[in-house]
Amino acid sequence: TATLSGTSTICYGTLSGSLPSINLTGNTGLVQWQSSTSLGGVYTNTAGTTSPVIDNGNSKYYRALVTSGVCASIPSNELLVSVDQPSAPGNISPSTQDICIGNTPTPISLTDYVGSIQWQSSTTNSAGTFTNMVGETNNGLVASSIDNSNTKYYQAIVKNGVCPATPSIVAAVNISQLPVPGNISLTGNSTVC
């Protein structure tokens, strides 16, 4: 019986020391490890002695083909190791906009991303402390979700499966305050010859 030690889902490019291992127990005979891209599909031989070398770039099924003498080879059960593609932050647009206080901002959109989204905002600057925006998990921020009273910075945190999250670039929404006309006053006579 083939058993899996470690997680059955890994992130693309996981280093060898962090990969799961598949072990075979209760077998009799010589072992040849095999892999396939589909359950019950065409299997090809893969490297490995006590455990197959796990492909860290593609989801695959693994099994052991056991041979004893002149007897027909028998395969073990199949085990799947899934590979999640890396989180990709995509492209944010517009990256900067300047509006007058109270005016309607342009919606901010995220394209070409891979993973799930959590929008965040900061009141300081692009290197400031960002906090999650409750309920904002779509691929864009509508105008009503963008502060039109104070300058703020927005970013999307994108996470795909078990892969580490990665932030998008920061979009700045700069708010100009209304001008203050002040008061004019007259020094001297208001009527001159």
Image (cartoon, rainbow, N blue to C red):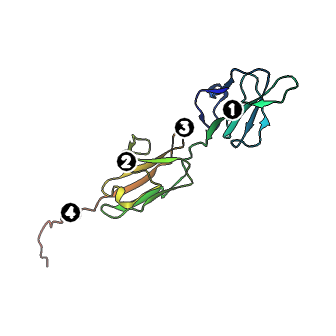
Q: Amino acid at mark 3?
A: Val
Task: Give the structural element (helix, strand or loop) at label 4.
Answer: loop
Circle 1 or circle 3, nearest the eye: 1
Q: Amino acid at mark 1?
A: Asn
Q: Earlier in the sequence, mark 1 or mark 3?
A: 1
Is residue 179 toward the left or the right of residue 111 in the image? left
Residue 55, horizontal then vertical, whole percent: 70, 35
Q: Quadrant of residue 44?
A: top right
Q: Earlier in the sequence, mark 1 or mark 2?
A: 1
Q: Residue at x 42, y 62 (%)?
A: 106
Residue 102, horizontal then vertical, whole percent: 30, 62
Q: Amino acid at mark 4?
A: Gly
Residue 70, horizontal then vertical, whole percent: 88, 25
Kindly identify which numbered label has been placed on residue 162.
3
Task: Give the structural element (helix, strand or loop) at label 2.
Answer: loop
Kindly identify which numbered label has been placed on residue 182.
4
Task: Give the structural element (helix, strand or loop) at label 3.
Answer: loop
Dot 4 surroundings within 10 Å: few (below 14), some, or many (20 or more)?
Answer: few
Kindly identify which numbered label has been placed on residue 77.
1
